[in-house]
Image (cartoon, rainbow, N blue to C red):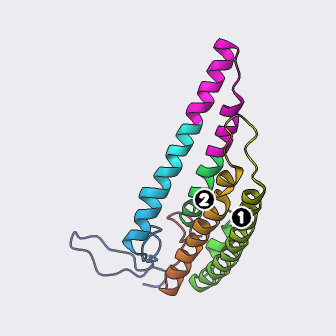
Amino acid sequence: MPGTDTMNPASPHGHAVASDARPDAAAPPGRGLPLWWSFIEDRILLNAATILMMAAIGFMFYEASSRSLLSESHWWAEELVRFLVVWSVLLSLGVGTRHGHYIRMDLLLNMMPHRARLAFAWLNSLIGLGFSVLLVIAGVQEVSHLQAVGMFTESNLDLPLWTVRLVLPLGGVLYGFAFVGNIILLLRGHDPDPPTEGENL
């Protein structure tokens, strides 16, 4: 009848199924990528980042307890917490970005047709990949400089500073791989960041 939605034939359970559902809407972010890719992201990088963040929380608790109960402050603990948090964030930044775990203003994007969304996804992936390359180049230059001058951390940890800053090029590489994964999905015709149910307007 005019004005009614077109429905597919009834399912085996007797319920009609809508025909306008997008194939990408309910698919997980890693579909279309090799299994080893998802394994590295979800099983290795995220677990490593979680362990580092938990270690940072443990050292923060130790430092706070030492100040409150013993009136002692450990400079090395404060510095180590900063290093652990930065490493945790940069190791998981690419995974979080590709899975859509970031603040975004996508009201207009969700109103666009599928092809327009893919065009913007291409633009976002290329710009993100370019930024990742710049981050890797700047990180390598900084690490090389710190290794050449032989600088150490400020506290009595006495860690070579270049080993701490090594996370910059490493994080840039991992961040770039997130956008490479999006490009692979785009080449296969998938939307790397499909709107979830309830976002379609």
Is residue 103 visible in the rendered image? The answer is no
Left or right: where 13 falls relative to 124: left
Residue 121, horizontal then vertical, whole percent? 62, 78
Q: Residue visible at 49% across and 64% down?
A: 197
In this view, the residue in front, 138 or 127, is 138
Q: Are marks 1 and 2 in contact (CB under 8 Å)?
A: no
Residue 88, horizontal then vertical, whole percent? 59, 50
Q: Residue visible at 68% across and 19% down?
A: 67
In this view, the residue in front, 82 or 191, is 82
Is residue 198 visible in the rendered image? The answer is yes
Q: Residue 55, relative to residue 135: is it above or below?
A: above
Left or right: where 153 falls relative to 25: right
Task: Give the CA separation, mark 1 to mark 2.
Answer: 16 Å
Residue on which disc 1 sits: 139
Question: Quadrant location of the C terminus?
Answer: bottom right
Q: Residues within 10 Å of mark 1 (few under 14, many from 20)?
A: many
Magenta stretch: give its range: 57-84
Q: How many marks?
A: 2
Q: Secondary structure at mark 1?
A: helix
Residue farthest left in this picture: 12
Left or right: where 194 falls relative to 128: left
Residue 85 is tagged as: none
Is 145 a magenta residue?
no
